[in-house]
Image (cartoon, grey):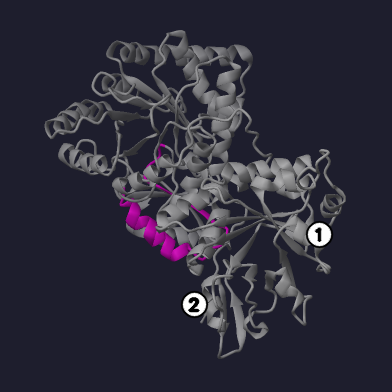
Amino acid sequence: MVGALGIGSMYPVRVQSMTTTLTMDTEATIAQSIRMIEAGCEIVRITAPSLREAKNLEHIRKGLQERGYNVPICADIHYTPNAAEVAARLVEKVRINPGNYVDKKNFNVIEYDDATYAAELDRIRERFLPLLAICKEHGTAMRIGTNHGSLSDRIMSRYGDNPLGMVESALEFLRVAEDEQYYNIVLSMKSSNPLVMVEAYRLLVKRLDEEGLRPYPLHLGVTEAGEAEDGRVKSAVGIGTLLQEGLGDTIRVSLTEEPEAELPVALVLAERAISEFSSEFIPGDNDSRNKLLRVANIGRDFVPRVLADLSMVAISSRSDLAPLGHIYDEATDKWQTAEQGCDYVYSGSQPIPHDLLPNGIRELMDSDVWLQQQERLYKVPVFASIADYASASEHHVVMNVVRIDVQKADEDLSGGPKSAVGQRVTPIIEKFTNDATVVILAECADAQPLVPLRNFFYTMAAHGLSAPVIIRRMCNEADAESLQLYAATDVGGLLVDGFGNGVMLSSDNPRLDELNTLAFNILQATRTRITKTEYISCPSCGRTLFDLQETTSLIREQTDHLKGLKIGIMGCIVNGPGEMADADYGYVGSGPDRITLYRGKDIVRRNIPSGDALQELVAIIKEDDKWIVREDARA
């Protein structure tokens, strides 16, 4: 219970956000909190980096109540236990970060034996007990919130910079709380990498069960997700995937935008959550796709492919392919393919004139239409079902795409319906299973297809089927935001587990550029195919030391052509250096209008004026020979 608000159990998924104003600016924080609440925020989180801010939470809370707003407040604490102890007397909830509540992070490696590590745990217990006593006395809730970016040197030295370290970091504090019979706790395992985040929450649930600890509510979030579609897709891959597994009781979407813009996104994800965790769920092993066969350039060691569905579109000129990343230059009579240029097109029953397609891009078409083509070698047939494939008079010598409804897959792969005597005919399936030219187009008509699609991969394994799989998702959502979030959840939730060798996003009313870009963005968010610069940017808060939204936009303008480069843009040092630890370069606020630049984990420019920082960042990238000239600049 957070005040009168229940989290977990029978309660709906709660949505929350965090203010970006200075906590000491009482009126600005109240005004922003009201905008958040009116956008749907159920818990307002406010940073309290010192005693002054912690004490001022009382005035903020009183001001909100005087205006008729009684939404609970959560104090966000880093480094300062005394601020937490003050805040716990004034607001309904405190969030502590086990990585820096007692410890520090300097990226030092420390050797511990069991005795010295036990002494460290005693030190944590001693420092944590006063806060637990205050929370019990005042009925204050607590979030023990691990951040991948702020794991302590102690934890990383003992367990590693990984999901296990994240889980152990929280459990060390949780065990103390349970010893003191304090249970009003929410747990979180946040990371800017959705794959790490998903794995950490799954491991946490497993460890709680194994140790006989209570099944505490979970707060879900992908930290430093970024802005616009990138931020939404990355958030949905992490948060949406877990909600579809029945995990997650309260969520925060961390966008580099105004906090009230986070709430509609969170609400869309929350409304789609399923009600309970399936004990039958078995995650993939992150290498599942590489265990499948290779057909042409699909499967095994190849990056996942993007297939554009043109079956509902009439292609009448070369310019019609521009939204798919294939641009024809009439002056030179040459094609240019962008980094996000689709790999295949599916024309269905209306084949595309050969002279309208660039060399190297293969056209998929319905098998009956394929049979009518004079030149069939460079076109690929798509069969409507296993039975259609088995009865066909001719197959392609290299690749045959077979559509499978995953909700009927077990029956189809078992040889069809049973006869009157309970037997199935299997020779067709044996031939299909052993055919090294087959690529499966996995489809599901369910409104929430992630679980049926995932179950299909288990069904494939049970039947010994090793054909590569293209995941097809229908995208008929009315608004762009729901489309982004749902598709990123349903497709990204498979890719994070190593399932799927390609993506096809289809629609009855296709917006080719949107669907093509979204497909590549989902692959980027799941780190299965990198086609552009990746930005790890925090959502800003009262600790932020510069205009984060404007700065992120300026950095993106200068660097968004540097494919594969990861750039961290952090408002302060609380999580910055750690959360961007796998970034190539970091841009971190170190004082008012002062920036410190990182190369990996190492500082290369310290406390430079913010007006010079972007130019200095570009100079460092050039020094490292990682700068490339834009195509438009060459022209």
Q: Is residue 380 left or right of residue 256?
A: right
Q: Amino acid at mark 1?
A: Ala
Q: Callout 1: few (<14), some (14-19), or many (20+) C-alpha neighbours within 10 Å?
A: some
Q: Callout 2: few (<14), some (14-19), or many (20+) C-alpha neighbours within 10 Å?
A: few
Range of magenta residues: 546-574
Image location of residue 313, percent across then percent down: 54, 74
Q: Visible in this render: residue 300? A: yes
* Label 1 sits on residue: 390
- Give the farthest residue toward the left: 66
- Give the farthest residue toward the bottom: 331
Image location of residue 369, percent across then percent down: 70, 74
Please tell me which of labels 1 and 2 falls first in the chain: 1
The answer to if 552 sits in the magenta stretch is: yes
Number of disc labels: 2
- Give the farthest residue toward the front: 420
Question: Is the residue under label 2 in contact with that under label 1 (CB below 8 Å)?
Answer: no
Q: Is residue 145 left or right of residue 311?
A: left
